[in-house]
Image (tube, rainbow, N blue to C red):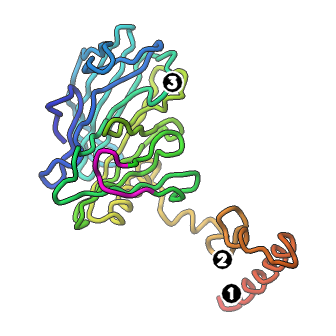
């Protein structure tokens, strides 16, 4: 992680010595119906830097180095952005030190980090994969990591984003780390920003959101590392815990909701009720056989 030469308070992310995610926009925050910008070029309303500090510490993810910037708007809002660097992850923070009002609108209430997409295809090329939609993976997106890519965002489209090299030697996962109900991504003008969902009407003092970046080899390995980081951060949960507690995952089962087998394969003579009854009978017999074999 290194300070961006283009945007004050922003950071570029390097993996293996090469730039992987480059800062693609200034820090922004909306308050009292106006958007304030650390660069002022985009909005004309100044987000002024009043303090910066570097500290170190540790938490459940390990030891970290933290770089923080405190900002103030013309209207008196105090807003902090920070980045924590761990051995195996980066965490970007936003914190409202004072309450923000009249924040609702399009896009995001606040933006940090913002990562830019390359203007032209790279050599060697990189790609992205993202799972989103009402059901995880229902609307999965994939393509070249280049400006114009159909990266998801907003209420439904915010989902883990994987950027990976063609040879799969390097992959990075980006996603919200906390405040999941309001943390969102927003693609716009060749960049993807992370922050508070734009429909939020006001933000209380002390509220914050975090975005995590986890890197590893290959898409699968990166996603597992990302999952491990979230499990540790939110209470040292174990990956197997849900499987151990849920009898429908431990034994044979079936589902009839939209997307499941029996939803689309109704018996032509018996209809949905008859199909379900017959399926339950067959399932009961299968479970009985299964239990006898245990």
- Residue at the spot x=70%, y=68% of the render? 255
In the rendered image, residue 114, in percent from the top left (x then y), is placed at: 31, 36
| Residue 34 to residue 6: above or below | above
Residue 135 image point, x, y percent: 57, 56
For the magenta stretch, what is the residue range?
141-149
Locate the N terminus and report the quarter of the image it occupies.
top left
Please give the name of the residue rendered at 78% of the width and 84% of the height, measured from the top-left corner: 282
Tag 1 residue: 290
Left or right: residue 18 versus residue 108 is left
Label annotation for residue 266: none
Q: Is residue 142 magenta?
A: yes
Is there CB contact under 8 Å for labels 2 and 1?
Answer: yes
Check whether the beta carbons of the residues at disc 1 and disc 3 lie within 8 A of each other.
Answer: no
Closer to us: 233 or 4: 4
Total residue callouts: 3
Left or right: where does residue 140 sit relative to residue 274?
left
Which circle, 2 or 3, is nearer the viewer?
Answer: 3
Distance from the alpha carbon under mark 1 to that under mark 3: 55 Å
The x and y percentages for residue 131 are 46, 55
> How much space separates mark 2 and mark 1, taking CA atoms?
8 Å
Label 3 environment density (alpha carbons within 10 Å; few <14, some 14–19, many ≥20): some
Residue hosting label 3: 105
**Neighbourhood count class around disc 1 (C-alpha, 10 Å): few under 14, some 14–19, many 20 upward:** few
- Please report whichever mark, 2 or 1, sits nearer to the chain's N-terminal start: 2
Q: Tell me the CA gap for discs 2 and 3.
A: 47 Å
User: In the drawing, what numbered circle is on residue 251?
Assistant: 2
Q: Earlier in the sequence, mark 1 or mark 3?
A: 3
- Dot 3 falls on a residue whose secondary structure is loop
Tell me the crowding category of disc 2: few under 14, some 14 to 19, or many 20 or more residues within 10 angstroms, Cα based: few
- Tell which circle, 2 or 3, labels the residue nearer the N-terminal end: 3
């Amino acid at each position: 992680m290194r300070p961006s030469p283009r945007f004050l308070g922003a950071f570029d992310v390097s993996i293996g010595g090469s730039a992987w995610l480059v800062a693609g926009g200034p820090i922004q925050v909306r308050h009292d119906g106006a958007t304030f910008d650390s660069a002022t070029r985009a909005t004309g309303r100044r987000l002024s830097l009043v303090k910066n500090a570097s500290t170190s510490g540790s938490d459940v993810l390990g030891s970290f180095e933290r770089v923080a910037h405190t900002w103030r708007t013309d209207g008196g809002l105090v807003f902090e952005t920070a980045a924590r660097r761990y051995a195996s992850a980066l965490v970007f923070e936003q914190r409202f030190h004072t309450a923000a009002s009249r924040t609702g609108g399009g896009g995001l209430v606040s933006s940090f980090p913002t990562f830019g997409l390359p203007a032209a295809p790279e050599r060697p090329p990189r790609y992205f994969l993202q799972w989103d939609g009402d059901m995880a993976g229902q609307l999965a997106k994939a393509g070249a990591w280049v400006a114009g890519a159909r990266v998801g965002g907003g209420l439904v489209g915010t989902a883990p984003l994987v950027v990976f090299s063609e040879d799969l030697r390097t992959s990075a996962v980006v996603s919200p780390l906390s405040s999941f109900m309001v943390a969102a991504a927003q693609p716009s003008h060749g960049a993807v920003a992370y922050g508070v969902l734009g429909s939020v009407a006001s933000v209380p003092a002390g509220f914050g959101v975090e975005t995590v970046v986890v890197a590893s080899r290959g898409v699968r390995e990166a996603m597992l590392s990302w999952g491990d980081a979230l499990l540790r951060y939110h209470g040292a949960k174990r990956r197997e815990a849900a499987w151990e507690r849920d009898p429908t995952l431990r034994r044979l089962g079936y589902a009839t909701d939209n997307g499941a087998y029996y939803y689309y394969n109704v018996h032509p003579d018996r209809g949905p009720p008859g199909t379900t009854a017959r399926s339950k009978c067959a399932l009961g017999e299968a479970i009985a056989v299964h239990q006898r074999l245990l």
